[in-house]
Image (cartoon, rainbow, N blue to C red):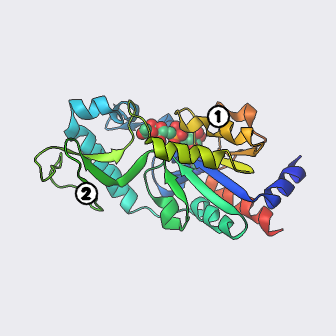
Amino acid sequence: MFESISKRLRESRKIVFVTGAGISQESGIPTFRGKDGLWRSNDVMKLATIDAFNDNPKLVWEWYNERRKNVFSAEPNLGHKAITELEKYSKVVVLTQNIDGLHQKAGSSQVLELHGSIVKIKCTVCNYKGETFTEFLDIPPLCACGNILRPEVVWFGEGLPQDLWQEAIVHANSCDVMVIAGTSLVVSPANTLPIYAKQNNAILVEINPDETIMTSNMDLSIRSTSAIALPELVSIFKQ
Ligand code: OAD
């Protein structure tokens, strides 16, 4: 079976990656669930919500300040770099739930950030949008209009930008191979992307040290970390 999947991988014209927090774990960025899911004893699932921000913007900004510091000093790992290298062999599109920018830092040319970006901010009231690459000293930071700024990310309780989501569906629906790396696939709507890929008869490959809720739908599950498995995947293309 592995031989036939290897052949289809080599013949693929478009590979879509669906990535999550696990792909950046080996760059020193904590995942959301499991043992990493607490920050100063706060459940990060509850912090990453619009309700938490409305109740206590200072606390949520403190968390984001710390995440910003961590992300700005992080470097792409061998997993991110392998995805970039695959562009030599096939069209590659990355649909990521991560906000850390490490795919772009590794050189990937087509990345859709489904949950936003940690460098982007916007005003909670006026139309101001911007980018910042440092920690904020005064939090919550204020817009020139006097109202509170927020990270331009998608929180629980909020929808993805519709045009971005439609673009993601088009990519998922037109790939030959979908590689799902470092995501628990529990968050909607990103976890529906493999269904769109299957509609195009794509093969599904999962890279995760643990099983996910969609493991039984995979054509191949590689139980390893992404920094180990993704370079091995690229080596299939070199054969
Ligand atoms: P999770 O924390 O839910 O899942 C991380 C997955 O990565 C798990 O399945 C781990 O087994 C796996 N993993 C851990 N280390 C790994 C490694 N080195 N290599 C490969 N896999 C590894 O993170 P996400 O699935 O990204 O959304 O979570 C999805 C969304 O939920 C996030 O974007 C965020 C979160 O709440 C929002 O904030 C809206």
Rounded to the nearest angstrom, the CA distance separating label 1 from label 2 is: 34 Å
What residue is rendered at 55% in x and 65% in y? Answer: 109
Q: Amino acid at mark 1?
A: Thr
Query: Do we see residue 32 in this rendering?
Result: no
Name the residue tied to disc 1.
212
Query: Do we see residue 16 in this rendering?
Result: yes
Task: Determine the secondary structure under disc 1.
Answer: loop
Considering only order in the chain, which callout, 2 or 1, is on the residue closer to the N terminus?
Answer: 2
Q: Relative to 60, is 26 above or below?
A: below
What residue is rendered at 23% in x and 48% in y? Answer: 127
Residue 232, percent across and down? 73, 60
Q: Relative to 19, is 84 above or below?
A: below
Q: Residues within 10 Å of mark 1 (few under 14, many from 20)?
A: some
Q: Residues within 10 Å of mark 2 (few under 14, many from 20)?
A: some
Q: Is mark 2 within 8 Å of ligand 1?
A: no
What residue is rendered at 83% in x and 54% in y? Answer: 8
Q: Nearer the viewer, residue 226 or 98?
A: 98
Using residue 110 as the reference point, say whether residue 91 is left or right of it. Answer: right
Q: Relative to 184, is 203 above or below?
A: below
Using residue 200 as the reference point, say whether residue 183 is left or right of it. Answer: left
Image quadrant where residue 195 sits: top right
Q: Relative to 69, is 223 above or below?
A: above
Residue 228, percent across and down? 66, 57
Residue 172, percent across and down? 64, 46
Name the residue tied to disc 2.
135
Q: Amino acid at mark 2?
A: Glu
Using residue 68 as the reference point, say whether residue 78 is left or right of it. Answer: right
Residue 104, percent across and down? 49, 63
Task: Determine the secondary structure under disc 2.
Answer: loop
Q: Is mark 1 within 8 Å of ligand 1?
A: yes
